[in-house]
């Protein structure tokens, strides 16, 4: 009854809104705009085509021009040149020059984004070229410049101290209103080098609950909805007024464990945790697709990184109990394991911006209890994961990790499994071999030479489990049949809003 009332109300609201603002493309997704610094939420502005990077990627992962129309590297592989487009303009009407682009990249280099992990010696401008000089060869540099933290902003975006005060980008849409954390309104910038977008105005609303987004799609309150729960997708597919598109994406739901804690400092403990997980059961019931059970950290979508002959991660409750006993854990009076008077009781932190994470966390709670591990589930904001990584208080987290954060997964490996780990990667785990492998991969372009290095890196992650894979992912997008031209970007780089048109 309540659901029917909601839909009736939303339909009325939608009709009112449509009559008054029929030209506005209404978009809903789970991602809040909690700040405007590119390193924090630059992905919102790049996906919605407000700001651009020098390089971008097509849905197959091939690097293609964005603000830079071409690029080249010197024979010694130490100097890269990115030649900017002549007609590129910022939303304030000023030209996108090599000087302003270099200044944006220097800011990214000094921050916490992926560019800071590249061996960059200096960034300068020479004519129309942004010139990046390296301390040592780094073949993945153009892929790093796809990352949202390297979006190019106009000088008017910054205050006198260099802090971002507004987003003035160069994409087809410019920001007309921002109401953090939920609402963002855009319109045709009138300055884009790629021409006019098909729909002049866009309204983006951050809606955390997946079922609420589904109801908004059904009611017509939104035209385009991202990241749908599988249970909602089944229902929405039957709606004649909606189109549902699904793509497998290089994103893995993982357990991020604190390998420095008494609970997970032994390999046997992490392996036991993995053996206790019923991945197939989770993917059947919650994700409605058993093919998404993660048998290793990288999904088959990442060509060259998925090892089909690697022994898969699987469930074996008896083996999990054996490994925990070997690590010194014994059952207490209530069945929860103990060691030196300490109960194996940990808090699992997750968040709802990916709506499937809380139900997966609840399933894991029940499964791990079978081997004597007590899990207390806490659903908070995604920002709590990096915050508690930073202060060392995170025990275990269930996160959704995108492994094409730059189109070359080496970028994510450098970030996640380098010394000290990362906000979304390893915590309390240090492995010199994998660091050496990733360093070699970063300077190796020959596929035949890369293959054994990639294979060995995957083997180490499969054996030591600094991050424990649970499921792979799909991205479901629901659109009204009022619009055409909607595409799914498996890399989640660019949602292609400018290509969408009203259906005739």
Image (cartoon, rainbow, N blue to C red):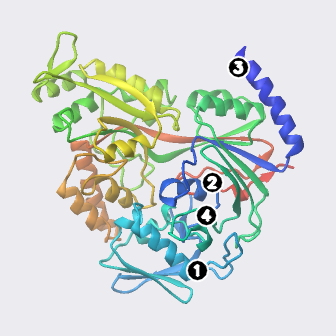
What number is the disc on residue 51? Answer: 4
What number is the disc on residue 3? Answer: 3
Q: Secondary structure at mark 3?
A: helix
Which residue bears the numbered disc 1? Answer: 84
Spatial CA distance of label 1 from label 3 is 52 Å
Mark earlier in primary sequence (4, 1): 4
Q: Is residue 290 among the parts visible in the rendering? A: no
The answer to whether 274 is drawn above or below residue 411 in the figure is above
For the point 54% across and 66% down, the residue is: 151
- Would residue 427 be found to the left or right of residue 209 on screen? left
Spatial CA distance of label 4 from label 1 is 15 Å
The answer to whether 455 is drawn above or below residue 96 in the figure is above
**Quarter of the figure with residue 457:** bottom left
For the point 71% across and 35% down, the residue is: 217
Which residue bears the numbered disc 2? Answer: 495
Mark earlier in primary sequence (1, 3): 3
């Amino acid at each position: 009854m309540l659901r029917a009332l909601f839909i009736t109300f939303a339909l009325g609201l939608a009709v009112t809104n449509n009559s008054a603002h029929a030209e506005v493309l209404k978009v809903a997704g789970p991602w809040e705009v909690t700040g405007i610094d590119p390193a924090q939420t630059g992905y919102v502005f790049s996906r919605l085509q407000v700001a651009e990077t020098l390089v971008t990627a097509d849905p197959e992962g091939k690097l293609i021009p964005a603000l830079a129309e071409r690029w080249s590297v010197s024979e010694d592989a130490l100097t890269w040149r990115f030649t900017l487009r002549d007609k590129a303009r910022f939303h304030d009407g000023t030209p996108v020059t090599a000087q302003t682009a270099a200044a944006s990249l220097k800011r990214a280099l000094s921050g916490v984004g992926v560019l800071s992990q590249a061996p960059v010696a200096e960034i300068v401008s020479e004519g129309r070229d942004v010139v990046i000089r390296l301390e040592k060869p780094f073949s993945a540099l153009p892929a790093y410049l796809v990352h949202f933290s390297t979006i190019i902003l106009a000088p008017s975006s910054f205050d006198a101290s260099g802090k971002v005060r507004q987003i003035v980008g160069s994409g087809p849409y410019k920001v007309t209103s921002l109401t953090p954390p939920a609402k963002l309104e855009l319109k045709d910038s009138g300055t884009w080098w790629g021409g006019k977008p098909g729909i002049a105005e866009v309204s983006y609303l951050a809606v955390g609950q997946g079922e609420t987004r589904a109801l908004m799609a059904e009611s017509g309150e939104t035209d385009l909805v991202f990241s749908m729960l599988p249970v909602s997708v089944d229902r929405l597919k039957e709606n004649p007024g909606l189109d549902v598109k699904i793509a497998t994406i290089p994103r893995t739901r993982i357990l991020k464990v604190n390998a420095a804690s008494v609970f997970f400092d032994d390999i046997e403990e992490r392996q036991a945790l993995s053996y206790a997980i019923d991945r197939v059961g989770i993917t059947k019931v919650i994700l409605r697709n058993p093919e998404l059970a993660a048998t290793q950290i990288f999904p088959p979508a990442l060509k060259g990184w998925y090892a089909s002959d690697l022994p898969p991660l699987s469930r074996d409750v008896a083996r999990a109990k054996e490994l925990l006993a070997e690590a010194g854990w014994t059952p207490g009076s209530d069945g929860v394991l103990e060691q030196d008077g300490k109960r194996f009781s940990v808090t699992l932190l997750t968040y709802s911006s990916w709506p499937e994470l809380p139900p997966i966390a609840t399933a894991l709670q029940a499964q791990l209890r079978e081997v004597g591990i007590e899990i207390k589930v806490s659903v908070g904001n995604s920002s709590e994961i990096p915050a508690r990584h930073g202060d060392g208080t995170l025990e275990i987290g269930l996160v959704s990790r995108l492994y094409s954060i730059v189109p070359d997964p080496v970028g994510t490996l450098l970030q996640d499994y380098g010394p000290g780990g990362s906000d979304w990667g390893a915590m309390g785990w240090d492995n010199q071999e994998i660091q050496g492998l990733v360093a070699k991969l970063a300077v190796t372009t020959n596929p035949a030479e890369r293959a054994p290095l990639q294979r060995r890196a995957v083997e180490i992650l499969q054996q030591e489990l600094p991050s424990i894979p649970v499921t792979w992912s799909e991205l479901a997008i629901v659109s009204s049949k009022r619009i055409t031209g909607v595409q799914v970007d498996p890399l989640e780089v660019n949602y292609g809003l400018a290509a969408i048109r009203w259906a005739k």
